[in-house]
């Protein structure tokens, strides 16, 4: 969706709404998830990032679906710790902020 590549998510223990678009297996205990970050306040996508998660959580994160997730508090090693809920997000480029 964005003209630039994904960057490491700046994890600060916060919850965020994400829309996964790619998964890569790193090893048997970890997967790398690339996702678009959705701003509920602005109702637009505000970035493209990546973080890591367990295979058990990765299997529940489906492409093109929106999720409210909680991150760890390590910006150098961002991890998705839990999925709070699935949330509706737009699926169009018209909603993208560039």
Image (cartoon, rainbow, N blue to C red):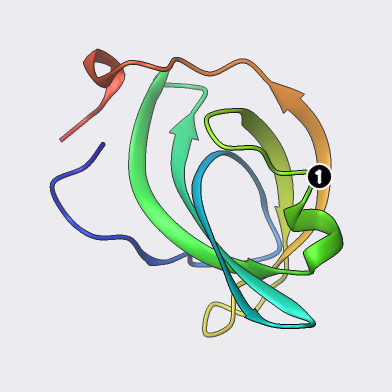
Q: Quadrant of residue 2?
A: top left
Q: Which of 33 and 96 is in front in this view?
A: 33
Q: Where is residue 78 in the image (x, y as percent from the top left)?
A: 60, 73
- Name which residue lies at 17% across and 55% down: 4
- Name which residue lies at 77% across and 83% down: 28
Q: In which quarter of the image is residue 83?
A: top right
Left or right: residue 49 versus residue 98 is: right
**Crowd around label 1: few <14 · some 14–19 · many ≥20 (10 Å):** some
Left or right: residue 94 versus residue 15 is: left
Q: Where is residue 6 in the image (x, y as percent from the top left)?
A: 32, 60
At numbered mark 1, what does the secondary structure look like: helix, strand or loop? strand
Q: Which of 85 and 40 is in front in this view?
A: 85
> Vertical placement of 27 versus 21: above or below?
below
- Name which residue lies at 32% across and 15% down: 92
Left or right: residue 51 versus residue 72 is: left
Q: Nearer the viewer, residue 18 or 64?
A: 64
Left or right: residue 8 versus residue 72 is: left
- Name which residue lies at 86% across and 60% down: 56
> Vertical placement of 78 versus 87: above or below?
below
Q: Where is residue 11 in the image (x, y as percent from the top left)?
A: 58, 67
> Vertical placement of 14 versus 40: above or below?
below
Q: To which residue does mark 1 refer?
A: 83
User: How many tags in the picture?
Assistant: 1
Q: Where is residue 1 in the image (x, y as percent from the top left)?
A: 26, 36
Q: In which quarter of the image is the C terminus?
A: top left
């Amino acid at each position: 969706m964005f003209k630039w590549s994904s960057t490491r998510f700046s994890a600060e223990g916060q919850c965020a709404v994400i829309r996964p678009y790619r998964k890569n297996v790193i090893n048997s205990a970890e997967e790398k998830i690339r996702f678009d970050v959705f701003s509920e306040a602005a109702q637009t996508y505000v970035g493209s990032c990546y973080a890591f998660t367990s295979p058990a959580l990765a299997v529940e994160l489906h492409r093109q679906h929106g999720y409210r997730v909680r991150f760890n508090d390590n910006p150098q090693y961002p991890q998705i710790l839990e999925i709070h809920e699935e949330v509706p997000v737009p699926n169009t480029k018209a909603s993208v902020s560039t």
